């Protein structure tokens, strides 16, 4: 069986977000050879810095490509902005075959025609006004300097049928499509023209992309058939929606991959979440890319919109943090945090991080609590601590002095001296030592707090400290 070749073909007009990354991931998982192509024909909006960022994002996610550019400097093999002569060749072939023609209709004329069709209850389609202009008339208009698009001629009785690998049998009538533009008036190629040409020339055999591209497919299949070029199989995946059911956007939770990386998400968390957005895996464990690829089945891609929930992403982040090796987790922490953690407590602190933190900023807070004197209690937390009374803290100081290295013995001594138990024992103690009512096990806190600091925090709630 021939290897399946897939591609990811982004336009570098901004940072890639979750939807782009999911398309790239499914493309990488759904083929044997993964190609990166840069579709930068929008010269006004395309930026080299966005190419560099998307390459960084793909590599961070672990989605390296077997074929494609290695840097942001455009080249004719992988950047569409450098492939104009190739597209021009195929435009000429279509014109010579009589399958494409110049259209001199202005945007205003097209808009008027569109409104007339809609007002009469008809779907807006190109009227074919320029479809049969005599050659001398075409020449005259060109000589007058009139701008023209190039349209692909679609017979009204033409029917395009194909089997979508996600959505099943598809059927499109030519009269519903109409003659469509394949080259804009400024000479730049329409998206679906150069997209289809490059897929054929680069040997792409499977195209995974969003369902919003489904109506482009019959146009592309007609172009490829007219040019005797090979046609890939198509798989149109469901779009991602936010928790409100609307298309995913900044408003309902979408973030760029760069932003997720800067927030401290592990790439394993992001790819495991994305791999399950609209695709089913049997297990619920955190998987590496080889296992995700082994378990990927295009038949398991759903047709319904895939709902993004940040709590789903955070679930996978928790698994990634807990499963991270010590060295990985240590360098995941901010440099400022690593600087305050004593070497003697590094292993214990990393154990605490695994159990209580999803992001480096949370570890920052616990490092300050445990290893610096930066502890300020909010009013409600201070009230919980103060409610235990001075005798409780005097008893705690005595118990800590008696058992500085044994939390169980310290706790038994505090119970015996104060008579406190349950939440009346643990809540004020946690509040006084950490400024919080929840968090790591108190035994771990007790072991990592140096004893002079621990005594000072307990003494804050005795009259002697006033």
Image: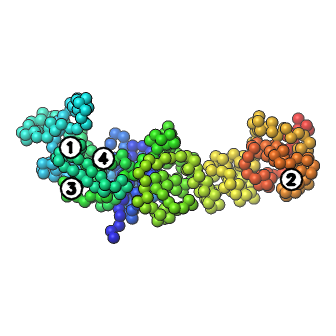
- Return the x and y of residue 279 as percentages of the image width and height: 46, 56
The residue at which mark 1 appears reads as 175
Q: Which residue is drawn at 90% across and 40% down?
A: 390
Q: Which of marks 2 and 1 is in front?
A: 1
Q: Residue 12: in sight, yes or no?
A: yes
- Calculate the distance from the C-alpha at mark 4 to the C-alpha at mark 2: 69 Å
| Left or right position of 6 against 331 | left
Q: Earlier in the sequence, mark 4 or mark 1?
A: 1
- Calculate the distance from the C-alpha at mark 1 to the C-alpha at mark 3: 18 Å
Q: Which residue is drawn at 86% across and 48% down?
A: 421
Q: Earlier in the sequence, mark 1 or mark 3?
A: 1
**Tag of residue 411:** 2
Q: Which of marks 4 and 3 is in front?
A: 4
Task: Answer few, some or many: residues within 10 Å of disc 3's Cα (few below 14, many 20 plus, some between 14 and 19).
Answer: few
**Tag of residue 221:** none
- Return the x and y of residue 317 as percentages of the image width and height: 58, 53
**Tag of residue 215:** 4
Task: Answer few, some or many: residues within 10 Å of disc 2's Cα (few below 14, many 20 plus, some between 14 and 19).
Answer: many
Q: Which of marks 4 and 2 is in front?
A: 4
Looking at the rendered image, the quarter that the C terminus falls into is top right
Q: Earlier in the sequence, mark 4 or mark 3?
A: 4
Q: Earlier in the sequence, mark 3 or mark 2?
A: 3
Task: Answer few, some or many: residues within 10 Å of disc 1's Cα (few below 14, many 20 plus, some between 14 and 19).
Answer: some
- Calculate the distance from the C-alpha at mark 3 to the C-alpha at mark 2: 80 Å
Compared with 422, 139 (above or below) is: above
Q: Is mark 3 on a helix, strand or loop?
A: helix
């Amino acid at each position: 069986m021939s290897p399946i070749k897939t591609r990811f073909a982004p336009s570098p007009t901004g940072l890639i977000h979750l939807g782009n990354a999911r398309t790239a991931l499914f493309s990488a998982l759904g083929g044997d050879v993964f190609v990166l192509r840069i579709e930068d024909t929008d010269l006004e909006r395309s930026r080299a810095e966005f190419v560099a960022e998307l390459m960084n994002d793909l590599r961070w996610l672990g989605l390296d490509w077997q074929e494609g550019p290695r840097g942001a400097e455009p080249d004719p093999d992988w950047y569409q902005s450098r492939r104009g002569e190739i597209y021009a060749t195929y435009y000429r072939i279509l014109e010579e075959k009589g399958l494409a023609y110049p259209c001199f209709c202005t945007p205003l004329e097209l808009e008027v025609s569109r409104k007339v069709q809609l007002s009469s209850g008809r779907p807006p389609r190109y009227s074919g006004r320029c479809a049969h202009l005599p050659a001398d008339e075409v020449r005259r208009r060109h000589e007058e300097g009139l701008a023209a698009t190039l349209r692909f001629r679609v017979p009204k009785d033409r029917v395009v049928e194909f089997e979508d690998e996600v959505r099943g049998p598809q059927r499109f009538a030519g009269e519903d499509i109409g003659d469509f533009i394949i080259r804009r008036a400024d000479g730049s190629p329409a998206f679906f023209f150069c997209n289809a040409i490059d897929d054929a020339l680069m040997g792409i055999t499977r195209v995974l992309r969003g369902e919003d591209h489904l109506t482009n497919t019959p146009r592309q299949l007609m172009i490829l058939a007219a040019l005797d070029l090979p046609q890939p199989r198509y798989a149109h995946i469901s779009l991602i929606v936010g928790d409100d059911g609307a298309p995913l956007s900044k408003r309902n939770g979408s973030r760029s991959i760069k932003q997720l990386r800067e927030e401290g998400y592990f790439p394993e968390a992001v790819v495991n979440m994305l791999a399950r957005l609209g695709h089913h895996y049997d297990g619920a464990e955190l998987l590496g890319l080889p296992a995700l690829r082994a378990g990927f089945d295009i038949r398991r891609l759903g047709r319904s919109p895939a709902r993004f929930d940040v709590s789903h992403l955070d679930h996978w982040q928790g698994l990634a943090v807990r499963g991270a090796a010590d060295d990985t987790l240590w360098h995941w922490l901010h440099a400022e945090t690593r600087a305050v953690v004593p070497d003697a407590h590094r292993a214990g602190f990393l154990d605490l991080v695994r159990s209580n933190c999803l992001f480096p900023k949370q570890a920052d807070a616990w490092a300050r609590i445990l290893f610096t004197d930066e502890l300020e209690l909010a009013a409600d937390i201070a009230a919980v601590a103060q409610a235990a009374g001075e005798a409780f803290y005097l008893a705690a100081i005595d118990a800590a002095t008696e058992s500085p290295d044994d939390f169980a013995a310290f706790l038994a001594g505090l119970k015996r001296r104060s008579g406190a138990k349950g939440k009346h024992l643990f809540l004020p103690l946690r509040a006084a030592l950490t400024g919080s009512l929840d968090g790591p096990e108190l035994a771990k806190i007790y072991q990592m707090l140096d004893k002079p600091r621990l005594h000072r925090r307990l003494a804050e709630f005795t009259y002697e400290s006033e």
